[in-house]
Image (cartoon, rainbow, N blue to C red):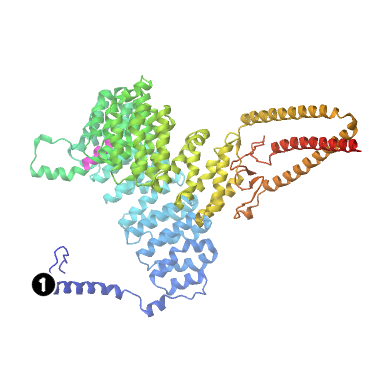
Amino acid sequence: MRPVIFSKMDFSHSSLFGYIEDLQELTIIERPVRRSLKTPEEIERLTVDEELSDIERAVYLLSSGQDIQGTSVVANLPVLMRQNPAETLRRVLPKIREVLHVAGVEMQLTAAVSFLTVLQEESVSIHTYSHSFLHIILQNLEHRDAGVSNAWLETLLAVIEALPKETVRHEILNPLVSKAQLSQTLQSRLVSCKIMGKVANKIEAHIVKREVLPLVKALCQDVEYEVRTCMCRQLEHVARGIGTELTKTMVLPELVELARDEGSSVRLAAFETLVNLLDMFDADDRSQTVLPLVKSFCEKSFKTDESILVSLSFHLGKLCNGLYGIFTPEQHLRFLEFYKKLSTLGLQQENGHNDNQLHLQTLEQEKKYISVRKNCAYNFPAMIVFVDPKNFHLELYSIFFCLCHDPEVPVRYTMAISFFEVAKLLNSDVYTIHKELVTLLQDESLEVLDALVGHLPEILELMTNGGENNGSESKLLSIPDLIPALTTAEQRAATSLKWRTHEKLLQKYACLPHIIPSDQIYYRFLHRMLTIILTNNVLPVQKAAARTLCVYLRYNRKQEQRHEVIQKLIEQLGQGKSYWNRLRFLDTCEFIMELFSKSFFCKYFFLPVLELTHDPVANVRMKLCCLLPKVKSTLKIPTDKHLLQQLELCIRKLLCQEKDKDVLTIVKRTVLELDRMEISVDAEQLEKEKQKNEGRSTNINDKIFEKKRRDSKTSSVLSKSVNLSISGSSSGTLAGKEEKKSKLVRSQSFSTQVLHPKYSNIDKCPNKSSATGYTSSVPGIGKSCMLSFSDDSFRTHSVGNSGNAAFPSSSSRNLFNSADQKNNGNKESQSRKMSIKNRKSNS
C-alpha cells in the first residue's frame, strides 16, 4: 500500500487513480472488522434464560457456554461465594475444576486471581477453603505456560500463610519431596524452591531440619543454574525459619559454595543473600567467612565479573556498616576508596582511547554505569555514617560535589531525595553543602527540583539554624544566592507543563518567612504570588499561591505593606473584572479566616466579601453562599452587631431577589445552616454596654422624678381641687400602667413569634411597613433575630450571657414609652383639674 501524502496534493489523472486504489485497500482492511460481528445464530447461542438463578446460570454457562462466558463465571466466583457459599461449593466449583483441565490461558489466570480473592475475603473458613480449593491450586501449579504457573504459585504462597501447620505439612510438604527430585521438570523444581522458602517459616525448626534442609541442599547443587539461583535466593527465608545455630552450620557453607559458582547469576544471588543475613552471623563468621568473600567480590567486579557491580553498589552502604566493627583501618580505607571509584564510574575515559570499539563498549555499559552511580547516591547517607560526619568534608565532600553535578538526571534525582538525610547527619556542619543546595535548586531537570522540594522547609531550617549563628540577620547570609535560586526554580516550574511540581513548590515556599527577612519576602516573593493568582490558569496552583501569600501577609509586621497588599487583594481580586479573579478572592478570604484572627477578617474583608452578593455571575454568588457560615463564625456580639446586620440584609436580598435556581437552592440550605449556628459573645464588651444602658436608664428615671416633683408643686397651688387632683393623678397613673402593660404584652407576643422562625415559610419574603417602622424575621442569622428599621437604619439589641446571640423586642424602647405615658397621664390630670375649677367658678 502506497502512503497517501496530503501535504502536496496532485490532482493529475494518474494520481487520482492512485488515491482511489488506496481507498479501496482501506475498505479491504475494514472488511475483517465487519466479519467479526456476531451473526444471529451466534447471538442465539450466547443468549441465556433470564429466569435462571445466579447459580443455575453459572452452571449452565460452564457446561455449554463459550470460553468467554466461562471466564466471566470464574471471574464472578467471589460474588457467588459471598451470596451463596454452600451452593457455589456444591455445584459451581466442581464445574470450574472440570473446565480448568482444558481451559485457555485467560481463564487460568482469572481463576488464580478469583481463588486468591475468595481467600482474602474470608468467604469460608480456612478449613473449608483448604478442602475445596487447595487441590485445584496444586493441580494447576505445573501448567505448561510459565505465566499461568507463576499465577497459581502466587496464590498458593498466599494460601500457605493462612493454612494451619498440620495442613501445610501433609498437603504441601509431603508432595513437595517428590516434586523437588532431579527427575522432575525444570519448572517443577523451580516451583519447589519457592515453596520451600515459604514453608520453612511456617513449620517447626526441627521439622525443617529433618525434612526440608535435605531438599534445600539437593536443590543448591542442582545441575541447572536457574534452580541453584532460585534456591540460593530462598536461603534467607530458610535461615530465618531455622534460627542462628542451624544457619551457621547448615546454610552458611552452602552460601560459601554458591558464592564461588561458575554461574554469574548464582554468585550474585549468593552475595545478596550474604548481605541480607549479616545480622545472623557473629563476629567470627563475619571476619573469617563473610569479609574474605566480600573482598573477593570487590576485586573481581572490575576485572572479570562486572555483572555484580550494580548489586555491589546497591548493597555497599549496608555492607560497610554491617562489617564496620571488624574492619582494620586499612580495610576501612580500602572500602571507602572502592566507593569513591564506583561514584565516578564511567565519567573518565581510561588511557585516552577514543576508537570506535571503545566507544561502542562505552555505549553498551552506559546504562550499567549510570545505575552504579545512582546506587552510590542512594548509599551516600550510609557512607557518611561509615566515615563519621566529622570527617565528611575531608573524606566525602568531593564525591558529594560530583554526584550533585553528575551529567545524568537519575543520579542527581537520587541525590536530591537523599539531601535531607545528608543535612540531618551533618548537623552543625550543614553549611558545607549550601552550594550544592543552590545547584540542585537551579537544576535544569524539574524531576530533580521536585525531589528536592519535598523536604525543602526542613532543609532550609537546618541550613539556617544548624550553625552557630542563629540570629535573624545572619540567616540570609548563611545561604548565599538562596533567593535568586528560589526565584529561578519557581519561574522554571511556572513555565513548564508540570503544574503539580509548581503547586508543590508554592506550598513549600510558605516556610520562607522563617528563613528570609520580611522585606525580602515582600519584594521578591509576595508580589510574585499575587501575579500567579491573577495570571496562572491552573486552579490548584492559584490556590497554593493564595495560601502562601496569606502566610507571607501573616508574618509581615509593617502596616503600610500590609495595607497595600490588602488593598490590592480587594481591588484586583474582589473587584476584578474577571469572575475567575473574584472566585479566587473568596478562596483567599477562606485562607485568611484560617490563618488570621477573626477581628482581622472582620476589619478588612467582611464587607468586601458581602459585596459579592450583587455579583452578576451565578458561580460567584454560589461560592459566596457556601462561604457564609465561615463568614458568620468570625463575628462577635455585641462588637460586630453592625456587621451581623449587614449579613442579615445580604441574605434577605438573596432570598428575595435571587433568580438562579441553583443559587437559590444553596441560599436556602445555607440559611438553615446559619440558623443552627451560635454567635460567640464578647462578655467583656457586653458587660460594658450593659452598664452603659443601666446608667442611661437611671438618668431617665431621675428626669422623670424631677418633672413629677415640679408637677406636684404646681398642683398644690390649686388648693380647692386637691382631692380631685389626687384622684385624677391616680386614675392617670393607673391608665398609664394599663396602657404600658398592654403594649408590653403585645411586644412580647410579637417577639415570641419572631424568635421562632418557621422553616416551611423560607420561600416567603416579608415586606410589610407601618408608621412605626419595618419589621422582618429572617431565619439563619442566629438562634433568634429581629430587625427594626426606622429611617432606613438598623437598631439591634443583643442580650445573652450563655454565649448565644439573641435579638428580642426592644425593651429599652418600652422604657421610653413608659416614661412618655406617665408624662401624658400627668398632663391629662392637670387639664381635668383646670376644667373642674372653671366649672365651679362659673357656677
* Of residues 448 and 400, the one drawn nearer to the viewer in this rendering: 448
**Percent x, y of residue 543:** 40, 42
| Residue 393, image x, y percentages | 27, 24
Residue marked by disc 1: 12
Residue 43 in view (yes/no): yes
Q: Which of 460/16 is in front?
A: 16
- Residue type for callout 1: Ser
**Residue at position x 87%, y 34% from top?**
725
**Residue 317 in picture, x, y percent from top left:** 31, 33
Q: Is residue 724 magenta?
A: no
Most common secondary structure along the magenta stretch: helix
Residue occupying image coordinates x 68% and y 41%: 808
Q: Could you say which quadrant of the image residue 511 lies in? A: top left
Task: Tell me, yes or no, whether the highlighted magenta stretch contains residue 375.
Answer: yes
Q: Relative to 418, say whether 83 is above or below.
A: below
For the image, the number of numbered tags is 1
- Stretch of the chain drawn in magenta: 368-379
Q: Secondary structure at mark 1?
A: loop
In the foreground, 65 or 837: 837
Q: Does the rendering let one see residue 244?
A: no
- Left or right relative to 773: residue 817: right
Label 1, residues with CA under 10 Å away: few <14, some 14-19, many ≥20: few
Q: Residue furthest bottom?
A: 41
**Quadrant of the rendering where the N terminus is positioned:** bottom left
